[in-house]
Amino acid sequence: MAFNKGRVCSESTQSVCGSVVTDRTCRPKLWHNHYVHCASTGADENPPTGSPGTGLTRVTLDTVTQLLIINFTFSGLTTPTVAAHIHCCISSPGNAGVATTVPAFPGFPMGVTSGSSNGVLALTQAASYNPAFVTANGGTVANAEAVFVTGFENDMTYLNIPTTQFPNGEIRALLTPEPAPGGANWIGAGRLVDDAAKGGRASE
């Protein structure tokens, strides 16, 4: 990983999933966190599903702790959920295989049309991956992690929620990360980890 060292005290503007975020704080410049805050929609599926379902996805990759922190909510799906995972590695609007654990993230609410999920995947652990993804990338967790992190950092991953009516995915969040200056506290990752320990919530 390449880190940018030094100190930044000037105003900076970033685009996070189309929203402009201006940061005026003075802090060490150490880009080891990558943050995504995106909408999940049927329009981003390939092919588009026309689903009225929507969602809000927050994903943080910390390349120092090697943790992937995943928080999202969703509602308005046409039929109950059957899975939830991250696909890698292809540029939008392509379709790629499932990279993370199957059929769904730990604690993800299955069989519902709305709900939320908070979780953490340790990228050094085999249980965090789809076995097929590990096999396709050299057969080791270390290789799978390297491929996944490279894909994530280069806009080649997406979070997908399949349902009964749309088993290949009803709504999708395109994960386009931005560097998160100032470490985990800048994005509240510590709070997200606390939330993740409590598990997800769901409603019919």
Image (cartoon, rainbow, N blue to C red):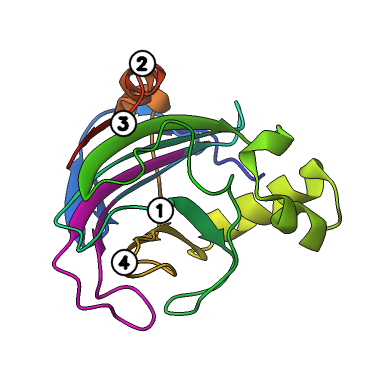
Q: Secondary structure at mark 2?
A: helix
Residue with the mark numbered 2: 194
Residue with the mark numbered 4: 170
Q: Please give the label number shown on residue 82.
A: 1
Indicate which label's residue lies in the foreground, 4 or 1: 1
The answer to which of marks 3 and 1 sits earlier in the sequence is: 1
Which residue is outermost to the bottom? 47
Q: Secondary structure at mark 1?
A: loop
CA neighbours of label 3 inside 10 A, class few (<14), some (14 to 19), many (20+):
some
- Whether residue 53 is situated above or below residue 46 in the rendered picture: above
Q: Please give the label number shown on residue 187.
A: 3
The answer to which of marks 2 and 4 sits earlier in the sequence is: 4
Work out how far the residue at label 4 is from the one at label 1, CA to CA, in angstroms. Answer: 10 Å
What amino acid is at disc 2?
Asp
Q: Residue at x 50, y 74 (%)?
A: 91
Is-magenta flag for residue 39? yes
Q: Secondary structure at mark 4?
A: loop
